[in-house]
Image (spheres, grey):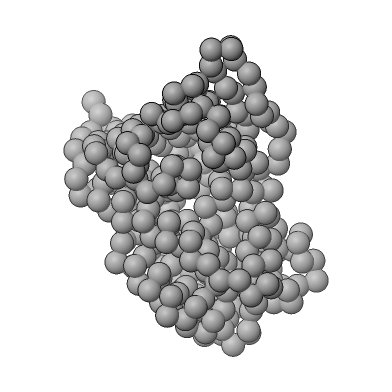
Amino acid sequence: MKTIAVIGLGNIAKRHRQNLKLIYPDAKVIALSASGRIADEEIEFADLQLSSIEMLIDSQPELVIVASPSPFHETHASALIQHNIPVLIEKPLASEPESADRILGLTQQHSGQVIVGYCLRYLSSAIEVKRLLSQNVIGEIYNCQASVGQYLPDWRPNKHYTHSVSANRSLGGGALLELSHELDYLHWLLGPLTLSYAQLRSTKELALDVEEIADLVLTNDTGCVCSLHMDFVQKQAQRECTFIGSTGRLHWDLLANTITLHNHEGTQVLYSVPQWDKNQMYINMVTDFINNIQRGECTTASLEDACHTVNLIAQIKQQATWGVTQ
């Protein structure tokens, strides 16, 4: 790779630029803001800053990472896809289902190389969970309980939480889109999910115009019932998932990077690598995509899954019971 670009100037864009410099130290890394503005300050881990998507296309990048707010994803990705430039689109694919469907359709028209950045699929314990479930380590899966939460004001200490993408409806904020990793990995592990029930809430504490808490009940094709909790309010971060099966229970702690099996024989830790560098998820995701590009492989599997997730989120918002905590 000689020329690579990242669209967006937020924290995730910075992470991608830094990782690209690590993977390809001699490559030219181009930065483009979501709006096309030229930043007053120097952009870290960037060799060049451009002011338009047209200028970016003219520079003939071999890979572009779209890390702008989700409402801008379609505009940025579509121009690149039409020029057959490989694109990694940060999650979520889009903020609206119509936009996600158009991106998918355009990719199929142009046989483009496009993936969506659901990096939790590259977490080392996630790969092991998928292997264990595929080997029926707990038999038939009856239930799944997943939970994720972190106090929004602690996410980005250098910015007031009300100014963040997560807090603003117009930028694709809200717990459902911002924490959609859970919907993606459940789809990846259990197959497509169907909505049975949803309750969305905001709080007087954060006072946002987006959902701060989401509680969902979903089912897959085999009848497994999934309970999913997502929130912006937990003062200590939590991210875990439990699978209940016919022969045992599997508990996956994503933050601790551990997997524990509970069955008739007792409790057994099947996987524990707490010191694993979480940044490796992002590096593995990008290098895997680059390897596919260089082999000339084209797949829309992750894009189709991501499109399903955006459509599911739209359905949840439409059918949910809404409330405000007292």
Count of marks, rendered view: 0
Q: Indicate left or right for 182 with 136 as reference.
A: left
Q: Would residue 312 be visible to someone looking at this image?
A: yes
Residue 322, horizontal then vertical, whole percent: 20, 38
Q: Would residue 48 be visible to someone looking at this image?
A: no
Q: Nearer the viewer, residue 298 or 245?
A: 245
Q: Indicate left or right for 236 with 143 as reference.
A: right
- Residue at figure coordinates x 65%, y 41% from the top left: 124
Quarter of the N terminus within the rendering = bottom right
- Residue at figure coordinates x 37%, y 48% from the top left: 192
Q: Nearer the viewer, residue 236 or 158?
A: 236
Which corner quadrant of the image does residue 225 belong to? top left
Residue 186, horizontal then vertical, whole percent: 44, 42
Q: Nearer the viewer, residue 120 or 176?
A: 120
Residue 311 vertical position relative to residue 113 in the rendered view, above or below:
above
Residue 313, horizontal then vertical, whole percent: 31, 50
Residue 221 vertical position relative to residue 229 in the rendered view, above or below:
below
Residue 187, horizontal then vertical, whole percent: 43, 46
Q: Residue furthest right?
A: 26
Quarter of the C terminus within the rendering = top left
Which corner quadrant of the image does residue 25 belong to? bottom right
- Residue at figure coordinates x 49%, y 59% from the top left: 302
